[in-house]
Amino acid sequence: VCPIAIHMENIMPFALLGLCVGLAAGTEGAVVKDFDISKFLGFWYEIAFASKMGTPGLAHKEEKMGAMVVELKENLLALTTTYYSEDHCVLEKVTATEGDGPAKFQVTRLSGKKEVVVEATDYLTYAIIDITSLVAGAVHRTMKLYSRSLDDNGEALYNFRKITSDHGFSETDLYILKHD
C-alpha cells in the first residue's frame, strides 16, 4: 500500500464512527436506492477494478492498491486519492458535484469529465463504483471495488465479479490489486 494511503488511514479513524448498516443490491443499470452520503464518507481502499482498456492478449501489469478518502467540503464531495503510477505514489485531490440522480456524481478534471455512480455498497465493508469518461473520443467505462478493510473481502469480490459480469466485463477484464 502506498505510504500516503497508510498516513491517510491513520488520520481518518473518526470517519468510521457513526457508520450504519445499509444494504443495496446491484443490478444492471441500478444504483444504490436511498443513497446516504454521510454513511459513505471516510476511508476506502481500492482493491480491484474492471477495465477493457488493456491490450488483448498481453499479461496484465501487476498493480498496487490505492486508497480514497471521501469528505464533504462546502457542499461538494471532496475526493483525495492515492495510487501508483509507474514506480511512484501519486496523491490527487478532486471535487465532485451531484449528478442527475441518487448516488450519481460528476467529477471534472483537466483530462475531462467523469460520471461516477455508486452501483452497490453496504457502507461498512465495500463499495462498487462505475466510472464513465471520454477517452480519445470514445466512451470508456471502468468499475472499481473499494473496501474499508484489507481483510476478508471474499463477499465483496464475489459481488464485484457478479456486477461487473452484468455490465459486460469478462474475468480477463478484472484486476485484483496487490497489497504489499
Image (cartoon, rainbow, N blue to C red):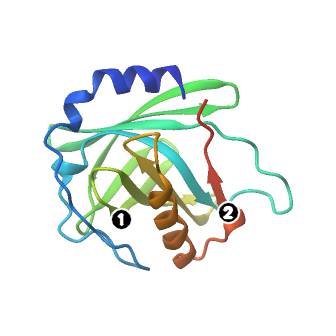
Q: What secondary structure is marked by label 1?
A: strand
Task: Locate the C terminus and report the quarter of the image it occupies.
Answer: top right
Q: Is residue 118 left or right of residue 49?
A: left
Q: Residue at x 53, y 75 (%)?
A: 167
Write down the residue under mark 1. Answer: 120
Q: Is residue 166 left or right of residue 38?
A: right
At 62% across and 60% down in the image, what residue appears?
51
**Amino acid found under the numbered disc labelled 2:** Asp
Q: Residues within 10 Å of mark 1 (few under 14, many from 20)?
A: many
Q: Is residue 86 above or below residue 132?
A: above
- Residue type at tag 1: Ala
Q: What distance separates the C-alpha of mark 2 from that of mark 1?
A: 19 Å
Q: Position of residue 147 (x, y in %)?
A: 41, 47
Query: Residue, x 40% and y 78% (percent of image)?
Result: 27
Q: Which mark is residue 173?
A: 2
In the picture provided, is 176 more to the left or to the right than 26? right
Give the mark, 2 or 1, whose residue is nearer the N terminus.
1
Measured from the top left, where is residue 131 in percent x and y?
47, 59
The image quadrant of residue 122 is bottom left
**154 lies above or below 90:** below
